[in-house]
């Protein structure tokens, strides 16, 4: 674990200390491309916590057409979502990550975009039936998470769904090293943004040692239907 995350943690700490908390992602992917580092979350397979949650609740997504994958990394989650019949847009702030997605999947139907979540195009607002956030919030400093969650929420269409997968901790536990586990209070902020909780799983995964994680589904409330 420590060896796997060592370079990423160092780059994150340096960027945050320099007031550039988002710059280290591109640096990490560029170093990894030169075999100078490892991207610790790039397993080159779809995230099993995401796929399990999707499969368990597949009936909810039958009529979903469009999906946005936030922080797509090397593209495995985005490709899996496309295989489920979704029209997928996948974004990452790291241009090297997006370039590698295009190299790995040259015939992909996924639209891969270099994009800063905090500067998302206005036409993405309320545009996607399904938005998937897995492991992005937990690599952002705590002070950036509320704004990041708000931007993610804005992309979900009315009655659409947001899937969240993240490490989890109790408020009294130490924040620890990156990736920084979220608290339920941080995740529950989505409810104040017009979402209702559909599924909320608090569990330990199969890693050694096991890691406490959260996976949940939230639906965006159709405010027009609720109007008198």
Image (cartoon, rainbow, N blue to C red):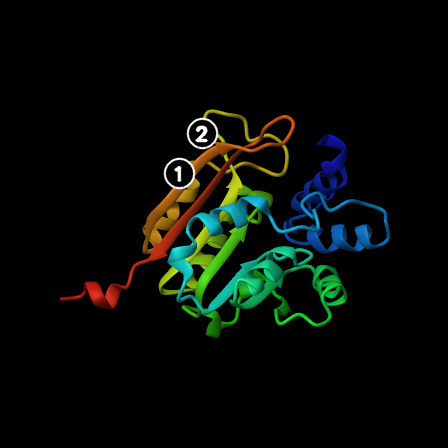
Check the image and report above or below for 193 versus 13: below
Tell me which numbered mark, 1 or 2, is placed earlier along the sequence: 2
State yes or no: discs 1 and 2 in contact (Cβ < 8 Å): yes
Name the quadrant of the N terminus.
top right
Q: Nearer the viewer, residue 63 or 153?
A: 63
View extreme (left): residue: 228
**Can residue 140 be seen in the rendering of this structure?**
no
Check the image and report above or below for 101 versus 215: below
Residue depicted at 58% across the width and 45% down the height: 48
Q: Nearer the viewer, residue 210 or 90?
A: 210
Check the image and report above or below for 90 versus 183: below
Please state the horizontal and vertical placement of residue 35, each as a whole percent of the image: 86, 49
Residue depicted at 72% across the width and 67% down the height: 102
Q: Residues within 10 Å of mark 1 (few under 14, many from 20)?
A: few
Residue depicted at 56% across the width and 43% down the height: 138
Left or right side of 23 for 155: left
Q: Secondary structure at mark 1?
A: helix
Give the residue at mark 1: 185
* Distance of label 1 from label 2 (alpha carbons): 8 Å
How many discs mark residues in the rendered view?
Answer: 2
Q: Nearer the viewer, residue 184 or 104?
A: 104
Q: Which mark is residue 171?
A: 2
Please state the horizontal and vertical placement of residue 187, each as a whole percent of the image: 43, 43
**Can residue 190 be seen in the rendering of this structure?**
yes
Name the quadrant of the C terminus.
bottom left
């Amino acid at each position: 674990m420590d060896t796997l995350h060592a370079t990423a943690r160092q780059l994150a700490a340096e960027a945050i200390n320099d007031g550039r908390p988002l710059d280290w992602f591109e640096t990490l992917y560029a170093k990894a491309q030169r075999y100078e580092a490892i991207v610790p979350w790039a397993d080159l397979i779809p995230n099993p916590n995401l796929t399990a949650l999707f499969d368990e609740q597949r009936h909810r997504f039958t009529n979903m057409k469009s999906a946005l994958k936030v922080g797509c990394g090397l593209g495995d989650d985005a490709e899996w979502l496309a295989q489920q019949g979704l029209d997928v847009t996948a974004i990452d702030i790291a241009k090297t990550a997006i370039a590698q997605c295009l190299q790995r999947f040259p015939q992909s139907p996924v639209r891969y975009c270099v994009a800063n979540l905090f500067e998302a195009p206005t036409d993405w607002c309320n545009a996607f039936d399904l938005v998937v956030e897995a492991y992005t919030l937990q690599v952002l400093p705590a002070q950036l998470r509320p704004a990041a969650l708000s931007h993610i929420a804005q992309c979900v269409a009315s009655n659409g769904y947001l899937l969240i997968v993240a490490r989890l901790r109790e408020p009294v536990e130490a924040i620890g090293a990156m990736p920084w586990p979220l608290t339920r209070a941080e995740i529950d902020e989505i409810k104040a943004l017009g979402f209702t909780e559909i599924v909320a799983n608090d569990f330990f995964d199969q890693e050694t040692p096991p890691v406490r994680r959260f996976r949940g589904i939230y639906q965006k409330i159709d405010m027009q239907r609720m109007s008198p």
